[in-house]
Structures are given as structure tokens and as C-alpha cells.
Image: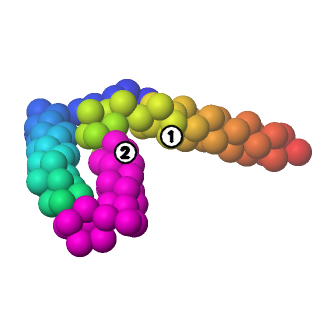
Amino acid sequence: MENFITEEMRYEQAKKKAQNIKSFYCNLTCYCIVIPILIFINLKFVPQFQWFWFSMLGWGTGLLVHGLEAFQLTFFFSREWEEKKISKFMEEERVKQKNNNQL
């Protein structure tokens, strides 16, 4: 099977990647603005219980995952992994079908 990607398809893929990176930077900007505000509010009004850590760690984890995806640094279940699995399953089906046809 030959990989056939038109110029329009390449453009759409590049556009999607750019939008994903832009979305990550917007998320990062919001994080950098909101978290210090939450820290201030927490320490100003309820300094005995530091609840801002929950927001900071939860949102920070999501931000990390978003960044890994945006910059295509996913190590598990990447597109390459998915394509290899699809190819493997398709080959298994071909072999199974070939064996069934021989019977």
C-alpha cells in the first residue's frame, strides 16, 4: 500500500499541529496567571490549609500532558505505535483469512 498524501492534506495536518501548539500556549498563559492568584487568595484568607496545591498539581499535570501531545512527545500510544498495531492486526487477519480459505 502506497502512502499518498496530497498538499492539501499536509496543509491540514500542519494547521492542526499549529492550532494544538497555540492551544497549549493559551493554557500555559492561563495557568501562569490563575495559579498565583489562587495562591494569594489561599494564603491571604486560609493560610492554615494550603489548598492551592490541588489546583496547581491537577492543572499542572493536565498542562504537562497537553504539552507532550502538542509537541508530539508522547512516548506511549503515539501515532507510530497505533500505525504499527493496525498493520499487525491487518496482517493477522490476512493470515487468518488465508488459512480459512485453504481449509
Q: Is residue 24 above or below residue 84?
A: below
Residue 42 lies within the magenta run: yes
Q: Amino acid at mark 2?
A: Val
Local secondary structure at mark 2: helix
The residue tagged 1 is: 77
Instruction: Say which of 59 and 16 sits in front.
Output: 59
User: In x, y percent, where is residue 100?
Assistant: 81, 47
- Count neighbours of disc 1 (C-alpha within 10 A) and say few if under 14, some if 14 to 19, many if 20 or more: few
- Rendered residue at 41%/35% (across/down): 74
Residue on which the image places disc 2: 65
Q: Are marks 2 and 1 in contact (CB under 8 Å)?
A: no
Residue extending furthest top?
Answer: 2
Residue at (17% x, 54% y) in the render = 36
- Occupied quadrant, residue 44: bottom left
Q: Is residue 89 left or right of residue 11?
A: right
Q: Name, please, the residue furthest toward the front.
A: 48
